[in-house]
Image (spheres, coloured by chain):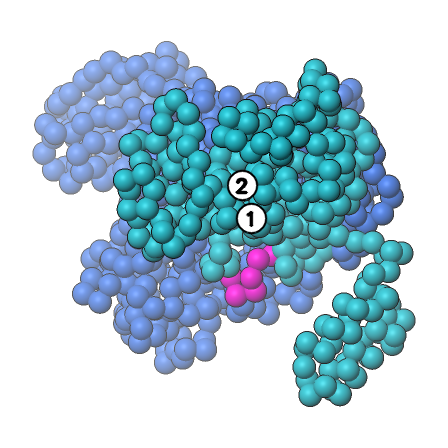
Chain colours: A blue, B cyan
């Protein structure tokens, strides 16, 4: 889109009287749980985690059947075999800093999709990040982002008619990253609310709802500034009050990324019904010193993955405390993966396809994608083939999470993309799960939604009873049980609850 | 928008000037800035000020470095002419590096940062998106976070730039009100004063309803005549007593002006 028509549309949108929040707004079809329902009711939330700089996929999710090939191809950065966390599915491992991801996987809350990319990959950070955020082909230049277009399609009267009674809260919030990104730039205007410190300065910004401007280019800018002032004033109080209302059971680290999670979690827990958030962790452009010279499990990349792991895990723990984690879907993305071959500066260079994580209580956690195969005699310029177009994920998220009935993805993404089954069938919410298994010291029982208490007994395979107890389940629907008194070996746990009996088996290490 | 006419009438001749003058940009700029085209009222446009323009614009307008050092001792505010070469104030000695760091590092750096422009640290090699990202360009500077930070900057500068602490109270660098008022043709008349501010610093005339709103908010029930009395009394006798009585009232007015939408553009 040309600047002129962007401005043109904006000026038309903004030429309508700036409307105060008691505007009469024709309610859109209200479907509980979908993005379309008005935001007075809690509903589904999408969190996008941008890993800025190009995350090294091969040191994040490691194909265990390629360890010796990887050791040959990337000796300067390869993790020691024994440090890699075995996912337990027989083929994949995680970077040692991702222990929280392992437990989320065990809890059936993490999906890994391998080999994501696009045709004719671009190796420029900016261009490739623009491609990912605008959801364009490699040779197509779009000036809007897929989230921006999605929000505009759901809210045709955005921005002038917002906030209003049905939508008192921002439709999307960007944290970190410094400014409006192309991700949230629509065809008509920006669609996100940016906040850095909701607790901060909150005097009203000077704004005149009755300003009259002549019809020229200058006024387009003035109307835009007025609109931002108006929305900023209107949203400031709802955002601030949500932020102040909540406290967190699990405090985040004192870092920029931790602070983004802190704000986001408080806003969600404080009852702000914003449905789309983005957070950013930068620094993944690890051309050098990706790993420490003496210990490849340490270094810049480990530091970043530690931040990612720690904050995502605490995010779900905080949501668990109040029973909101069912409502949240979280996904990572990065502009590209990195080279298969490492360089002499203990780093890796711009690559192509890479894995991506999706988190959520209801996610179908089947791992997608074949393990990448490292070719013999791999050269620096060889790159991984992509197996899935990144827009398949967007299409799936749009149609199966954000907008469950209308199939918006085609219009937002410009054409149809293959989709996968994002969520488990509803029956799975009634399933009992035990994790991690094998057990080291404590294991957890994932309890179906409607169960609030149960009685359990632990037996060995000979029927000898070792432990029993009554469990009252917290809103997180996860109940921990210690195995301190158990020897190494196989055990059964027999569970009795209001509507039946369950027997689960585990191995104590 | 670049039309064929602009291409042939403006760009091609300027390119010729560039070649004819041994590739001197100065020569090109001299011709461009002196041209009729440059002042053509038929193609009005504007650009949203960058954070640096917004902040430095305020400080430069107020000629902050020829201002006062101020210090609140619990009862009254003390004013003393600021001299960066002799920074001793009260019993406090402060070295030049710390002073410069406090003055620009603390005050300006963070303010620019909060407004989306961390100086010397552009987000990538292309610089800040406002300078290159079509079709949005300069509108990138304004969002719900940065618009608050801009107000906050005006609010900070209103109290003066923090220099250092003395006996638990800040020592601030504050503009010289008398000098500042003297730069106006008729500062005692609120409307004249406002209009001159508007002409001097804003990218567009303020609309009449905004002017009325601002005037009501700032002068409240006060008759404009009282504004005139206060200002004239101070201009006639810039004593500390008169300064104390007018400084905060004037700050209230002036720093609201910096929040006007028309001030955000130039």
For label 2, the residue is B176
Q: Nearer the viewer, residue A319 or B6?
A: B6
Residue at the (73%, 22%) spot, across then down: B225
Asked whether A176 falls inside the magenta stretch, the response is no
- How many residues crowd around disc 1 within 10 Å: few (fewer than 14), some, or many (20 or more)? some
**Real-space Cα distance between discs 1 and 2?**
8 Å
Q: Please name the residue that numbered disc 1 is placed on.
A: B63
Quadrant occupied by the C terminus of chain A: top left
Q: Which mark, residue A54?
A: none
Say which residue appears at 43% left-offset and 17% top-offset.
A450
Work out which quarter of the rendered image holds the N terminus of chain A and state it. Answer: bottom right
Query: Is residue B60 depicted above or below A361 in this figure?
Result: below
At mark 2, the secondary structure is: loop
Q: Name the residue at 41% across, 77% down.
A: A380
Label 1 or label 2, whichever comes before in sequence order: 1
- In the rendered structure, the answer to whether residue B211 lies left or right of residue B108 reads right
Percent from the top left, x then y, of residue A131?
61, 59
Would you say residue B168 is visible in this rendering?
A: yes
**Secondary element at image label 1:** loop
| Vertical relation: B1 (above or below) B167 | below
In the rendering, at what x and y percent does residue A364 appear? 47, 40
Q: Which residues are magenta?
A: B124-129
Q: Main secondary structure of the magenta part?
A: loop
Instruction: Verify CB contact (< 8 Å) between mark 1 and mark 2.
Output: yes
Seen as rendered, the residue at the extreme front is: B236
Residue B111 vertical position relative to residue B17 in the rendered view, above or below: above
- Which residue is nearer to you in this view: B54 or B47? B54
Quadrant of residue B253 within the rendered picture: top right
* Horizontal relation, residue A350 to residue A82: left or right: right
Q: Give the x, y percent position of residue A240.
A: 51, 25
Q: Residue at x 30, y 70 (%)?
A: A346
Name the chain under label 1.
Answer: B
């Amino acid at each position: 889109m040309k600047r002129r028509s962007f401005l043109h549309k904006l000026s038309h949108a903004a030429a309508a009287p700036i409307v105060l929040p008691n505007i009469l707004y024709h309610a859109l079809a209200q479907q509980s749980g979908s993005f379309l329902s008005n935001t007075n009711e809690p509903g589904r939330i999408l969190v996008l985690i941008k890993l800025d700089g190009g995350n090294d996929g091969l040191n994040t999710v490691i194909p265990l059947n390629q360890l010796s090939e990887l050791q040959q191809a990337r000796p300067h950065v390869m993790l020691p075999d024994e440090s890699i966390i075995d996912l337990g599915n027989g083929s994949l491992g995680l970077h040692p800093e991702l222990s929280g991801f392992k437990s989320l996987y065990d809890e059936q809350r993490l999906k890994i999709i391998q080999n994501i990319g696009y045709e004719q990959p671009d190796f420029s950070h900016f261009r490739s990040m623009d491609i990912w955020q605008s959801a364009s082909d490699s040779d197509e230049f779009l000036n809007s982002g897929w989230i921006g277009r999605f929000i505009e399609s759901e809210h045709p009267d955005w921005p002038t008619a917002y906030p209003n009674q049905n939508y008192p809260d921002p439709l999307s919030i960007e944290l970190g990253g410094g400014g409006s990104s192309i991700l949230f730039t629509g065809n008509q205007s920006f669609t996100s609310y940016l906040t850095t410190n909701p607790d901060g300065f909150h005097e009203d910004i000077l704004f005149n709802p009755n300003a009259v401007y002549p019809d020229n280019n200058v006024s387009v800018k003035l109307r835009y500034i007025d609109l931002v002032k108006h929305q900023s004033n209107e949203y400031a109080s709802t955002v601030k009050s949500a932020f102040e209302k909540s406290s967190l059971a699990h405090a985040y680290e004192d870092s920029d990324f931790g602070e983004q999670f802190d704000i986001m979690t408080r806003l969600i827990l404080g009852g702000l019904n914003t449905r789309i958030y983005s957070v950013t962790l930068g620094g993944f452009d690890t051309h050098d010193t990706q790993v420490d010279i003496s210990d490849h499990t340490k270094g810049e990349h480990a530091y970043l993955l530690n931040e990612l792991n720690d904050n995502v895990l605490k995010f779900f723990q905080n949501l668990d405390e109040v029973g909101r984690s069912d409502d949240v879907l979280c996904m990572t993305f990065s502009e590209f993966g990195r080279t298969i071959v490492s360089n002499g500066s203990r780093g890796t260079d711009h690559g192509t396809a890479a894995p991506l994580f999706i988190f959520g209580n209801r996610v179908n956690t089947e791992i997608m994608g074949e393990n990448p195969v490292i070719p013999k005699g791999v050269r620096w310029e060889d790159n991984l083939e992509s197996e899935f177009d990144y827009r398949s994920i967007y299409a799936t998220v749009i149609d199966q999470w954000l907008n469950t009935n209308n199939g918006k993805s085609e219009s937002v993404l410009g054409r149809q993309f293959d989709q996968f089954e994002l969520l488990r069938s509803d029956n799975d919410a009634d399933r009992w799960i035990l994790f991690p298994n094998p057990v080291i010291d404590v294991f957890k029982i994932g309890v179906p939604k409607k169960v609030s208490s149960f009685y359990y007994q632990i037996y060995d395979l000979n029927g000898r009873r070792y432990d029993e107890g009554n469990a009252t389940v917290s809103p997180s629907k996860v109940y921990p049980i210690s195995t301190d008194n158990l020897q190494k070996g196989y055990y059964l746990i027999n569970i009795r609850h209001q509507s039946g009996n369950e027997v689960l088996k585990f191995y104590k290490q | 928008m670049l039309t064929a006419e602009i291409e042939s009438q403006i760009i091609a001749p300027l390119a010729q000037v560039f070649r004819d003058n041994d590739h001197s940009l100065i020569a090109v700029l001299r011709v461009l800035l002196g041209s009729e085209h440059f002042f053509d009222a038929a193609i009005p446009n504007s650009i949203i000020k960058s954070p640096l323009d917004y902040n430095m614009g305020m400080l430069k307008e107020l000629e902050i470095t020829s201002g006062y050092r101020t210090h609140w001792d619990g009862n009254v505010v003390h004013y003393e002419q600021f001299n960066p070469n002799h920074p001793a104030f009260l019993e406090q000695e402060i070295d030049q590096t710390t002073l410069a760091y406090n003055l620009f590092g603390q005050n300006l750096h963070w303010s620019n940062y909060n407004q989306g422009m961390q100086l010397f640290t552009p987000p990538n090699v292309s610089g800040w998106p406002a300078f290159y990202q079509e079709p949005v360009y300069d509108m990138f500077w304004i969002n719900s976070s940065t618009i608050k930070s801009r107000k906050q900057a005006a609010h900070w500068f209103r109290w003066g730039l923090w220099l250092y602490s003395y006996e638990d109270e800040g020592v601030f660098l504050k503009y010289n009100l008398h000098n500042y008022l003297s730069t106006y043709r008729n500062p005692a008349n609120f409307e004249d004063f406002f209009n001159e501010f508007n002409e001097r610093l804003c990218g567009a005339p303020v609309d009449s309803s905004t002017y009325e709103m601002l005037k009501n908010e700032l002068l409240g029930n006060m008759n404009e005549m009282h504004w005139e009395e206060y200002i004239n009394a101070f201009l006639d006798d810039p004593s500390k007593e008169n300064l104390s009585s007018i400084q905060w009232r004037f700050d209230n007015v002036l720093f609201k002006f910096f929040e006007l939408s028309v001030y955000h553009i130039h």
